Image (spheres, grey):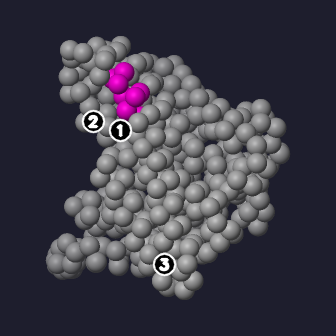
Amino acid sequence: MQPMLDILITIRDTFNHHIVFGIGILLVVGYYVGKLAEKVRLPAITGYIIAGVLLGDSMTGLIHAEMTDTLRNITDVALGIIAITIGSEFSAAKLRRLGPGILIITIVQLLFTFLVVSGVLLLFGMESYSAFLLGAIGSATAPAATVVIIQNLRARGDFVDTLYGVVALDDAGCVIIFAGVFALIGGMLGVGEGAGGFFLATLGHAAVEISLSVLLGLAEGVVMHILTFRITRPNALLIILLGLILLFTAIAISLHLSPLLANMVAGAVIINLSRRGNRIFQAIRPLTPPLYAAFFAIAGTELNLGLLGNWWILLLGSIYVISRGVGKYSGVWLGAQLAGTDRKTRDYLGFSMIPQAGVAIGLVLLIQASPLLAGAPPPVAASLARIVNIVLFAVMINELIGPPLSKMAIIKGAEL
């Protein structure tokens, strides 16, 4: 048995250093595990994520940590296309028909999730600064799974339009809440000389980042419109569109802006500038299946099963996952009630807000890199460092249970 294992390890170590090998095995294994997931009535996305877990460092190690870092370039491209797709749903006609309901639902569910998660963690004895930070992070929702499920099901109608709107606005709202809480925590702890002023400045930084991301998205949308207006051949259209998405996504990342927000705005600009805007999104569509499969498989490689061995992280992470789920669903239900939406939106939309990934991980990495952690007393630093593991555990759970819940909600609420 041992010689066979040694041979397999040698084969693995011979090929798994190359990104092309990584993409290839993720797509092949992801496809077949996705098919198995569909046979048991789970979304293919869940299969892609499980394939990533099987191939990642937590299991076989075929996709090791260094390759995962390189493969994140694929996720940037996929997120850019996902964001463009979300933005395309923001046509002026749809927004007029839906009214202010999207904004009301978004604000209510953001605040309600923050309050529920923070409150429950405080009841379980967590320090106030950690509870408030986790409450802010808990308000984030990952839109990628929802978008892919909608496209696979070919769902449509007001339920889908409202869902697109809420997930699009959610991340910007989450960043604002986190910046405010981060500023408050810095002032409370008084870490380092002038810490209060530094962390209060994060509010302004968040506002500037969002504003510049929107401006970049406006520029991207206008440039796309100008350069593609006279192009009629789908192949030529695809070349220029992919090039522009790559360029503007790289610009956003290099300037530390939000490529997700910038591409959402670009999609909204395109769909509102021209009646022929739909042809742009039709040209991109052939790229989406392999990109989305790779995106979710790569996400699976980043899930750390080792966290399951720490009972304290399991307990706090489970409390976070449950309280966040309750906050998201209840917040959407209350917001939909206040907005006067239909019963299906009120009853099912909240289930589509469970997935959580990129933004949440980005925020905990911000905590890790901040002077707040570096200059804190040892007990405070240990508590803040624990937040990272809690969120990573929660992301793992929410990425596995979120897509099936989202698929169920879309089937119940949308027109298929």
Left or right, 320 with reference to 362:
right
Look at the image and give the residue range highlighted in magenta.
199-206
Residue 302 versus residue 245 in the image, above or below: above
The mark found on residue 55 in the picture is none
Q: Which residue is mark 3?
A: 238
x, y percentage for residue 298? 38, 63
x, y percentage for residue 134? 44, 31
In primary-sequence order, the first of circles 2 and 3 is 3
Label 1 or label 3, whichever lies nearer to me, is: 3
Left or right, 150 with reference to 248:
right
Q: How crowded is the residue under tag 2: few (<14 C-alpha within 10 Å), some, or many (20+)?
A: some
Q: Which residue is mark 2?
A: 368
**What secondary structure is marked by label 1?**
helix
Query: What is the CA distance from the residue labelled 1 to the residue labelled 2?
Result: 6 Å
Does the segment drawn in magenta span residue 404? no
Q: Residue at x 48, y 72 (%)?
A: 227
Query: What is the CA distance from the residue labelled 1 to the residue labelled 3?
Result: 36 Å
Q: Is residue 36 visible?
A: no
Q: How crowded is the residue under tag 1: few (<14 C-alpha within 10 Å), some, or many (20+)?
A: many
Q: Is residue 344 visible?
A: yes
Q: Which residue is mark 1?
A: 364
Q: On the rendered image, what quadrant is the C terminus found in?
A: bottom right
